[in-house]
Structures are given as C-alpha cells and as structure tokens.
Amino acid sequence: MTTLQGTTAETPPAQTAATPTVPALQATLLRHSFGGNEVLHGVSLAVQRGEVVAVTGPSGSGKSTLLHLLGGLDRPDSGEVYWGGTRADSLDTQARARLRANSVGLVFQHHYLLADLNVLDNLRVPGLLLRQELTEQARELLAAVGLSGREKAMPGQLSGGERQRVALARALVARPSILLADEPTGSLDTANAQAVSLLMVELARKNGAGVLLVTHDEAMAGRADRRLHLLDGVMTGSLPEM
Ligand SMILES: Nc1ncnc2c1ncn2[C@@H]1O[C@H](COP(=O)(O)OP(=O)(O)OP(=O)(O)O)[C@@H](O)[C@H]1O
Ligand SMILES: [Mg+2]
C-alpha cells in the first residue's frame, strides 16, 4: 500500500531546475536620447532580491539617466523595464507612480526631505497613507538608522549624515523590492559616507530588496555583491582591471 510514510514535515519542497526566479529589477536593451543625442545605447541588467549591485563609470557616462529610467521617473526611447516581473515602462504615469510607491525606493545625493515636515512625517509621506502600520514601520526604520527619539525633529535641525539616514529610511518604509541609489553618500564626509553605505546594504539585505547603487566611492562599490561599469552609455559586466 502506498503511504506518505517517510515524508516528514521537514522534507523540503521539491526544487526543480525550472523553478523561475523573478529578478527584483530587470531591464532589457534600454536606449535613451536627449535632443537627438543618444546617451544610453541598449543597456540590459538584472538585480535579484537581496543582491547589491554597484554601477560605476565616468561623469557623463549615463548612470543617472539609467537610474531615472529604472525608477520609472523617465521613459526609455526603447527597451523594457520590469519591477518584480511587472513591466513598468509601458504603464501610464498614474499606474506607474502607484506601482513605484510600493516597489521602488529612491535615494539621491541630495536628501530631498520636506523641510516643513518633521522626520516621522517625512517617512509617512511616500505612501500618502498615514496608516498605523506605516507609522510603526517608520519608527522601526528610524531606530535602525540610529535616529530613535528624533521623530519630531525638523530636517533643518539634523546634520547632513542624519538627513541622509532619514532619506534612506524613507526609501525603505514601503518595503520596496528594489532600492535605487544615485551617489547617496556623495555629499557626506568619509565617516558618515561609510556609516550610511553600511546601513543601506544591511537594511536592504534584511528587507530582501535588490539594490542598484551608483557610486564613485570605491570602498562602497567594493561592498557590493557584483559590479557593473557604464562607459559612454554601454554597460560592461565588471570594472576593468586597475
Ligand atoms: N535633462 C538632460 N538634457 C540634456 N542632456 C542631458 C540631460 N540629462 C543628462 N544629459 C546628458 O546625458 C549624458 C549622461 O548624463 P548623466 O547625468 O546620466 O551622467 P552620469 O553618469 O550620471 O554623470 P555624473 O557621474 O556626473 O553624475 C551627459 O552627456 C549629460 O549631459
Ligand atoms: Mg549622475
């Protein structure tokens, strides 16, 4: 008689080679021009959940342009962008903004905190949902970035490093599956830059988010799981030997 004897609760589910892993972020053959001048010439990449990928490249090579396309802040001339398997670039502006609010966290060199809102409210704004659970998540993240007790502080009362830690917490508050960061420590001194970059990698990994990080900071790029290099709008797999 066939029984299920021998099959215990600890038996892991069958994994087959065909089990698909949907990347947190995927882009295929992105092209983008400004006024007839093409600055991205068919860039493709994928970032898995929990993976940190650093993008380096000279000034003007197209890094920020690429991040804007990946974050849905701008549309590519051609090519496709997927957030967790959902095609984002072809959505209309409203639908894309709604999906972005739940899927993508953005951190830039400038913190872009709203000066008239306190720290806690800055974190609650991105979802535009002043739900209790968002408040709790915001408080947890503020604690994680070392700013417990500063919820009522105004951005103007914080140091540059503290403001950037608030910006990082804000980017993660909606539990995005993708974190896009464009030189997030570019305006900080070395000690603060290191503290913020370590926090970013740690928190993103803990939240299972895939991270794409544009940086000129070698130490920061060295902490990534993988490195990509953009040169004149063309992506290469890794940094050339130096
Ligand atoms: N809004 C725009 N209008 C016209 N040209 C633009 C615009 N934004 C970027 N460019 C041009 O596109 C190219 C790529 O710019 P981008 O900002 O993506 O470079 P980057 O790699 O981020 O440089 P950096 O390291 O200095 O930040 C540059 O030649 C730039 O002048
Ligand atoms: Mg840039």
Image (cartoon, rainbow, N blue to C red):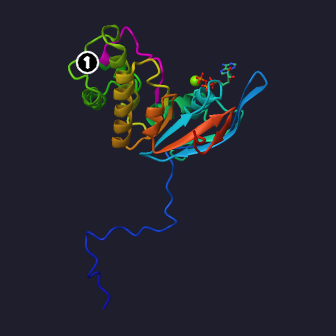
**Depth check: 74 or 238 in front?**
238
Which quarter of the frame holds ligand 2? top right
Residue at image coords 24%, 17%: 150
The answer to whether residue 84 is above or below residue 38 is below
Instruction: Residue 191: name its quadrant.
Output: top left
Q: Position of residue 185 (x, y in %)?
A: 43, 24
The residue labelled by disc 1 is 151
Instruction: Residue 86: name its quadrant.
Output: top right
Residue 89 visible (yes or no): no
The answer to whether residue 124 is above or below residue 30 is above
Instruction: Residue 165: name its quadrant.
Output: top left
**Depth check: 4 or 14 in front?**
14
Q: Is residue 136 left or right of residue 59?
A: left
Region rendered in magenta: 106-119
Residue at image coords 37%, 8%: 116
Q: Amino acid at mark 1?
A: Glu
Residue 116 within the magenta-colored segment of the rendering: yes
User: Helix, strand, or loop for circle 1?
Assistant: loop
Residue at image coords 51%, 29%: 215
**Which quadrant does the N terminus fall into?**
bottom left
Q: Position of residue 62 (x, y in %)?
A: 64, 29
**Farthest bottom residue in view:** 1
Residue 144 within the magenta-colored segment of the rendering: no
**Which quadrant does the C terminus fall into?**
top right
The answer to whether residue 58 is above or below residue 15 is above
What is the magenta segment's predominant secondary structure?
loop
**Farthest right residue in view:** 36
- The 10 Å Cα crowd at callout 1, few under 14, some 14 to 19, many 20 or more, is some
Q: Position of residue 91 (x, y in %)?
A: 61, 35
Picture mark count? 1
